[in-house]
Amino acid sequence: MIALHLLGQRPYAPVHDLQRAWVDARAAGEVDDGVILVEHEPTITVGRARGAAAHVHDPRGMPVIEVERGGDVTWHGPGQLVAYPIVKLEGTKADLHLHLRALEQAMIDVLASVGVTAGRDPRNTGAWVDGRKIGSVGIACRRWVTWHGLALNVAVALDWFRSIEPCGFDPSVMTSLQEHVPSTFIDDPHALALPLAAALAHTLELPWTGEVQHEVPAPVRARLTDRGT
């Protein structure tokens, strides 16, 4: 597994292009499975669920982008760590529900490592703490290569979620790690990039050296160049 950690806050659209290029390269056998770890600039994304666009109420100048993943509307932005596993599902792993559960478990494991007990809601996806949603999942799959992924609220100003009905819920359902640990404990989502990469390597059963890189793999970069992005 290649763990690509993009430093700083990144606009959504270029990272979306990066995912698409990696999916194509992975499907062609040009590059290994990977995970992109990133903190986005404020962005609203709208999934394929029926009526999702109606859950956007006040974008406040944020870009609103329709995407390929399943699910409803969500927010990405400062204080949130996003992971996009790009994985070819083969053999017994060719199960999208199993893949979603693995993403949820990775968040649950990372939260446990910092002393926060999280779990699942039997009716809804994601990671939950005391009845509130701390992490969201939503995936797409093309030629059995997955993309999109998970978003873990680490040090998020929860007022951002008032622009939408996140995943169709009232905004008050959302929570962030900083509400459950001392505020000075973790105030930078990038501090959890390495632990989240390790948790994903474990739950997705992907071999990994334990190292992260900051440069886009050459085959993916070549496809981005071909696309003119």
Image (cartoon, rainbow, N blue to C red):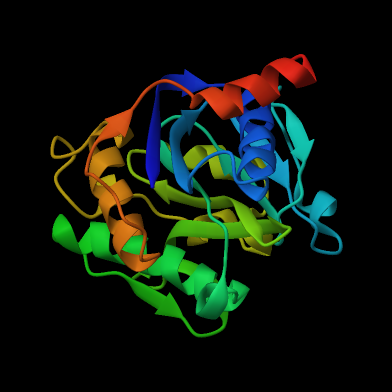
Q: Position of residue 138 (x, y in %)?
A: 61, 58
Q: Position of residue 125 (x, y in %)?
A: 54, 71
Q: Position of residue 91 (x, y in %)?
A: 55, 76
- Considering only vertical position in the picture, is 47 above or below 193? below
User: How many tags in the picture?
Assistant: 0
Residue 173 or residue 30, whichever sits in front: 30
Identify the residue at image location x=61%, y=37%.
Answer: 22
- Considering only vertical position in the picture, is 208 above or below 25? below
Residue 39 or residue 187, whichever sits in front: 39
- Considering only vertical position in the picture, is 122 above or below 73? below
Residue 198 or residue 205, whichever sits in front: 205
Q: Position of residue 20 (x, y in %)?
A: 69, 38
Q: Residue 132 appears in which quarter of the rendering? A: bottom left
Q: Residue 171 appears in which quarter of the rendering? A: bottom right
Identify the residue at image location x=71%, y=22%.
Answer: 61
- Answer yes or no: is residue 83 visible: no
- Answer yes or no: is residue 185 visible: yes
Q: Residue 59 appears in which quarter of the rendering? A: top right
- Considering only vertical position in the picture, is 122 above or below 177? below
Identify the residue at image location x=48%, y=27%.
Answer: 217
Task: Farthest residue to the front: give it.
Answer: 29
Q: Quadrant of the C terminus?
A: top right
Tell whether 178 sits left or right of 95. left
Tell whether 164 sits left or right of 161. right
Residue 218 or residue 37, whichever sits in front: 218
Identify the residue at image location x=40%, y=64%.
Answer: 204
